[in-house]
Amino acid sequence: MINGEKSPAYDAIVIGAGVTGMYQTYLLDQAGMRVLGIEAGKDVGGTWFWNRYPGCRLDTESYAYGYFALKGILPDWNWSETFASQPEMLRYSNAAADKMDVRKHYKFNTKVVASHYIDGDNVWEVTLDNGEMVTCRYLISATGPLSASRMPDYKGIDSFKGEYFHSSRWPTEADGTPKGLDFTGKKVGIIGTGATGVQIIPIVAKTAKDLYVFQRTPNWCTPLGNAPLTAEEMDHIRQRYPTILEYVKSTPTAFPYHRDTRKGTDVTEAERNEFFEELYDQPGYGIWLSGFRDLLLSKESNKFLADFIAKKIRERVKDQKVAETLIPTDHPFGAKRVPMETNYYEAYNQDNVHLVDIRATPIQEVMSDGIRTTDNIYDLDVIIFATGFDAVTGALDRIDIRGKGGQLLKDAWADGPSTFLGLQARGFPNFYTLVGPHNGSAFCNVGVCGGLQAEWVTRMLTYMRDYGLSFAEPSQAAEDQWTTAVYADFARTLMADANAWWVKTTTKPDGSIVRRTLVYVGGGPEYRRRCEEVAYSNYEGFELA
Ligand code: N01
């Protein structure tokens, strides 16, 4: 017993061995804490372990995402492309795990099914799917904002005789390499046109006999502009690591872009279009993140860019009926995550690629040999579900997490999360949610923001240990203030009305609909300033004991 409390088996349990989880495990071990990691996959990598679909790659510049390289953990790492592919990202994750020697802390192939806070003992009892129960003082989730895959509940789905799978569970060979990338002679259906579908479609279109894209909602997609990095470019990048890290930390989302200081209306139409052309031709997210500063605040400014992108779609897609179906009409540009594409629109110019507008003709059922919509039957050999995730809180909802008095986290957050700094919720002491709801990491370049958050949590836990503290829980006032501000910040943006994955929509028993943001949009620098302020004031806002 320590201080009258029960002594747990571990100081901390970290759920997840993605880039954030494994770094958190490493930092706590370095700080001299007894740490256990739990990971459902058979090895490290998180999102890069699970997502092995064709075309899967970063949409952040590799060097800006690679925190382990930027921090000097992997100083010699060579990125081969501006936007690294999934196999390279998995190699990077493995190299980082080797260097930090974190695998020894992990139980792989193991899921957490329940985590219960035991009031009197001040410990978390964590139950695993192998029936084992382990205890810890600090429970830290690093489950990733996009890990709980979501399958639609179409009638008849189990009767389909061909292969079908979610994009994040792509079938693999015994050695883990993705299989079935050659679709020669096959009729393939893909449901979903978010960032994942947009990456898969042009690749499958290369070999499939016929590819049917079942689109419910089109997205505003812009060119990725990927290219190989030469050894000279990599040398130059490596020399600038400290500057790159400081720069990305200074931007709202830790991408290497700052917004232009002008509003869309500050310039003439000709200047605007010239600026948009420059941004469209640049690789990466410049068009979303370095455009006019009022892009996500002013409908007028947003429409300038949306009209420009619509024109590009009409130019790139030959069949104008198809082009119109691919142009979003339900949300402003950038109010949902902008999928970065490589030859996405050109794929629709191929004779073997067919766009099916399932908003106009909804899917009725999956049959043994295809999909039936309201006006047609599509014969298929393979169905790929690129239907996204129960985002941010989804992975936590799937664990029976109970805080003080047995309160279920899922119930506490039924109408949307309520937290302090997006890191802890009242009633769930000593439970930290890395890259969780309402913190500055989920709506961010996770490679960097997750790492910075793990460092902050390590500092707090080290502080607590040094001062003989073992209990932290946000005060009601701090949590209310934070949560109200997160919702108010979001409501001021054009993102408020778009159905992006970062908005949770709940239908109440009386039929009313509650929409709540799952992410903090106040920007990384402001988020970290606030976290530093809390740390500086001896963790004011947390009740420590
Ligand atoms: O998921 P999504 P995603 N019937 O939710 C459709 C990151 N990421 O996996 O919009 C029919 O964006 C749904 O339609 P609708 C990135 O942050 C990064 O594509 O709901 N359709 C939508 O078209 C991204 O934002 C990279 O009407 C259904 C699609 O499925 C996030 O992951 C690459 C449906 C889901 O789109 C999620 O992207 C890939 C149904 N029942 C992903 N249910 C990088 O480049 C859903 N849909 C790093």
Image (cartoon, rainbow, N blue to C red):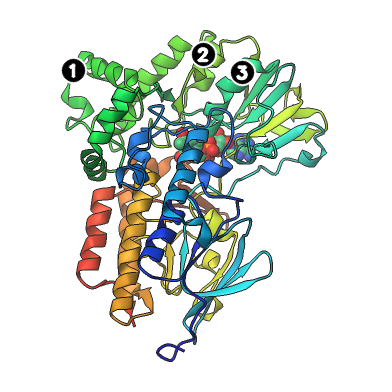
Q: Is residue 407 visible?
A: yes
Q: Is residue 373 visible?
A: no
Q: Please say if 319 is above or below 98.
A: above
Q: What quarter of the picture does the C terminus occupy?
A: bottom left
Q: Secondary structure at mark 2?
A: helix
Q: Secondary structure at mark 3?
A: helix
Tell me which amino acid carries mark 3.
Answer: Ala
Asked if the residue under mark 3 is in contact with the one under mark 2, i.e. CB atoms within 8 Å, the reply is no
Residue 432: which disc?
none
Residue 268: which disc?
1
Q: Nearer the viewer, mark 1 or mark 3?
A: 3
Q: Which residue is mark 2?
A: 346
Q: Nearer the viewer, mark 2 or mark 3?
A: 3
Sooner in the amino-acid sequence: mark 2 or mark 1: 1
Residue at 54 percent across and 9 percent down: it is 319
Kindly report the distance in space between the C-alpha atoms of the residues bearing marks 2 and 3: 10 Å
Q: Secondary structure at mark 1?
A: loop
Image label count = 3
Kindly report the distance in space between the C-alpha atoms of the residues bearing marks 1 and 3: 40 Å
Q: Quadrant of residue 534?
A: bottom left
Asked if the residue under mark 3 is in contact with the one under mark 1, i.e. CB atoms within 8 Å, the reply is no
Kindly report the distance in space between the C-alpha atoms of the residues bearing marks 2 and 1: 31 Å
How far across and down, in percent of the image, does residue 379 sit? 78, 23
Residue 366 relative to residue 204: left or right: right
How far across and down, in percent of the image, does residue 39 sit? 56, 56
Residue 205: which disc?
3
Q: Please say if 528 is above or below 151.
A: below
Tell me which amino acid carries mark 2.
Answer: Glu
Q: Please say if 320 is above or below 104.
A: above
